[in-house]
Each structure stands twice: as C-alpha cells, then as structure tokens.
Amino acid sequence: MAIIDCAQMIEPHWHWDCTPFVSQSYNRGDEFQEFGLKWYGFGFSTVTSPGWKMTGGKTLDQVPMDWFAGVATVIDLSGIVGAITKDVLLARLDGKSPRNLIVLKTGHADKTYNRHVGYWKEAPQITPDCARIMAERGYRHVAVDFPCDSVAARRPDGKGAIHNFNETFRQMVHGQGMLLTENCENLSAIEQDEVFFVSLPIAMPPTGSAPCRPIALTEWKSDSPELTDVSTPFVNHWRWKLELWTGRSLDNGDDREEQHFVLGGHGYTHCDAPCHMERDGATIHEMPNSGLDVFIRDAHIIDFSDLNLPQPITREMMAERAKKVKTGEHVILRSDLTNNLGYPSREWHLNAPNIEEDAAKWLAERGVSAVCLDFPQDYVARQMPYRHVKNEEFVTHHAIFRAGIPFVEDLRDLGRVTTKTPFLLAVPLRMTCVDGAPMRVVAVDW
C-alpha cells in the first residue's frame, strides 16, 4: 500500500495568517525541541463545512466520520481549457459508483507554488452548478487542488486584491450541505480511479474550518469500515500552552465562524519524533514519507484499564499483556485515564499509570513501530506542574526514542474501538517543525 501525501506544507506565508513556530529549540539552549502553531481560521490545506459561513449550517464536529475518510471517486480534470462546467464533470462522472468523497485533480497546485500570486490568478475555474451535480450524485466531501478564497487588498490605496471566481463554487458546495478540502497538492500522483481518501480536521471546539493533512491510500480492505475517533480535542488547559478563542463570528455580524488558537508544545493528540528529547534523534521529516509510512499502519490495543491507578507498568506486565504484538505494529496502551478523569483535570498527571524504563525497553526490543497511549508515560511527568523537570529525567521517553521509535500521545475513547487490532489513521499536520505535530487519530475496523 502506498500513502500519497496530498497536503501543502504549513510555513510562513504572506496571505494566510497560519504559521508554525519553534517554541523550544536546542539551538537556543533549551532542553527540548518543541513545535508551535498559530491558526487564524484558514490557510494551506483546510477543510470547511457549511457552518463556516452559513448560520445554522453544520460544523465539522456535526458530520459523521465517514465524510472525512472513505473510498473516493477520483476525477481527472487536468488539461481542461476554459472553465470546468457541469457538462465536463458529468462526462467524467458517467459510470462512477456513488461514494461519500470525490477528489478533483487539476494539477494546478503541482505547477504553481502557493507563495506566487499566480496560484490565485491562474487557478482553474469551476462553475457553481458542479457542486449541485456532485450533491445529487450523493457526494458529501469534495477535495480540490486549487484555492477558493480571494486575496484582499493590503495596500493603503486598495490595490493588490485578487478576486477568485471559485468562491461561488465553495459557497454552492456548502449550500448543498457538503464539506470542502481545498489547497490540496500532489493529486497528480493519484493514478487510480478510486482511492481511500482521508482529510481529517484537527480536533477543535465546534467550528466550520480546521487545518488538515489530506492523504490517499492506494489499497484498503473494506469499502465500509467502522471509524472511531480517538483524538482529544483542544480545550483551554491549566497545563498545556494553548490559547484558544473565537475569532470572527456570524453572531457578531462577521462573514464566517472561526476558532483561533496558538499552540506551543506537546499537548493534546500529537506525535513525538525522537528529536523531541534526543538531540541527534530523527526528525519527523527524516521518517519514511515524512512520518506517514510510520504512523499509518496496523496496531494492537493492550488493555491496562483494569489497573487501580496510579500504578507502574512493569516489564513483566508488559511482556504478558503485549506478547501478541508483532514487530512493525503499533502498540496502543489503553488506561482510560482521560475518559475517567477528563483531560483538563489536575489529577490527570497524578493518577496516571507510568511505564517503567525496563518495560519501555521491552517494547523497543519487540520492534514496535510506534507507542500510542492515553496517559503520560513517564513517572516524572506528575511532577511537571510543580517543578522544572530536566530532559534526562524522562527515562521512558528516552528508552523508546533511542530505538528510533516515535510516540502518539494523548488519545482517548479507546474503549469504543470495536477491535483489538485496528488499522490506525494517525495523521500529523504537515509543518516545517521537526519534532512532531498535532494529529487527528482514527481507529479503523475494516
């Protein structure tokens, strides 16, 4: 199975007020390497729902998970001269099986970098009635490799604005009740008529727009898998460095509904690349396919939810309960800590289980592909709210990182997963930061 990365890299940009930043760095003398992200409602690969600009429209959390991930029809619209009309689209839809997702590939983002004004000025135009045609065929989510936003004038004289014809198309997509992922790239790499397409928004409070990392899988086991979201959404928190607030609001007379955030560090559902705590450890970009080939694969859930917490997980306990885990699989350690206490609880650290160093070494020796869990794995983490904890004190992290193995952290709802051996769609945002990224994680029961 190939995993095709269809997301634009999140980096500083002249138009979009969305940018990654480094919150801690070895180069500055810090003890850790940590990513940060500022999100002001829109930019790069983004998924939007009707509630983004329509009063009463559905927000992203109000639609089923199979609108974000599933078998998708792929329509090749490259080489079209003039606007993409309903007749052009209908000709290419002829004989296609009904699906929830549809991918329209024009090749535009592959030819024109999004830092160039030509990305907007030369974007292919698609007529609004195409949205109606797709809705009538039963599609619920449309993905495109071009922009649908206009560029506002920023000069004092009002010049420099770029009107985008495709804003009316996006409006019609939402008017038909559908989702839209725009600013995809690398869709030209998709050669099949159908793929398993995934465009998962980062888990946030109710909102109509969120960053995502669209991907395409060239193989899948079932056309109708059961999808269980196991991500912890953003909330203002006493411990993690997050500022979360409502930006523009339809209730205030603005033209859209947005949640904004500034995240500085490793909280909520995210991944850790080894360089997060190991100065010479691999970055997320050095991992196969920038991490996608590592994080998206078969997994095995190991249940520790019966433990009376807090309690250490020893090597013997790990060896007994995880003995069926195969080399190259993810191991998912379930404690139900987040479900029982709530993620914002101050008791979350104090009542967590912890993986003893020797138990972590057992996992490393087993050759797991990633360690995924719903609790803070190091015993010393419970002291973080009260004192500065040094890098070398995170012995569990280091035992895993030194084997070149990453973490997927801060999961929840693992008890809702209907199989002990799910396929894990753990999709990190594509950012210029090197030590990890925010993630949306979905367990798949094929």
Image (cartoon, grey):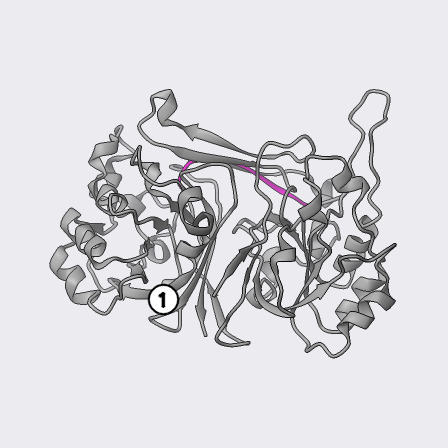
Q: Position of residue 368 (x, y in %)?
A: 28, 58
The count of marks equals 1
Name the residue located 25 percent from the left edge and 50 percent from the top edge: 352
User: Front-most of 410 and 78?
Assistant: 78
Q: Position of residue 182 (x, y in %)?
A: 68, 51
- Tell whether 375 sits left or right of 57: left
Label 1 residue SS: helix
Q: Which residues are magenta?
A: 257-267
Q: Is residue 254 visible?
A: no
Which amino acid type corresponds to the residue marked 1 in the rendered image? Gly
The quarter in which the C terminus is drawn is bottom left
Q: Is residue 326 visible?
A: yes
Please check the rendered image and state whether residue 155 is part of the magenta-colored stretch, yes or no: no
Is 35 drawn above or below residue 130 in the view shown? above
> Circle 1: is it few (<14), some (14-19), or many (20+) Cα within 10 Å?
some
Q: Position of residue 102 (x, y in %)?
A: 68, 65
Is 262 drawn above or below residue 288 in the view shown? above
Name the residue located 39 percent from the left edge and 49 percent from the top edge: 343
User: Front-most of 77 and 144?
Assistant: 77
Name the residue located 71 percent from the left edge and 42 percent from the top edge: 112
Is 17 drawn above or below residue 339 in the view shown? above
Please check the rendered image and state whether residue 264 is part of the magenta-colored stretch, yes or no: yes
Q: Position of residue 417 (x, y in %)?
A: 40, 69
Hey, which residue is sitting farthest left in the picture?
316
User: Front-most of 172 and 147?
Assistant: 147
The residue carrying mark 1 is 415
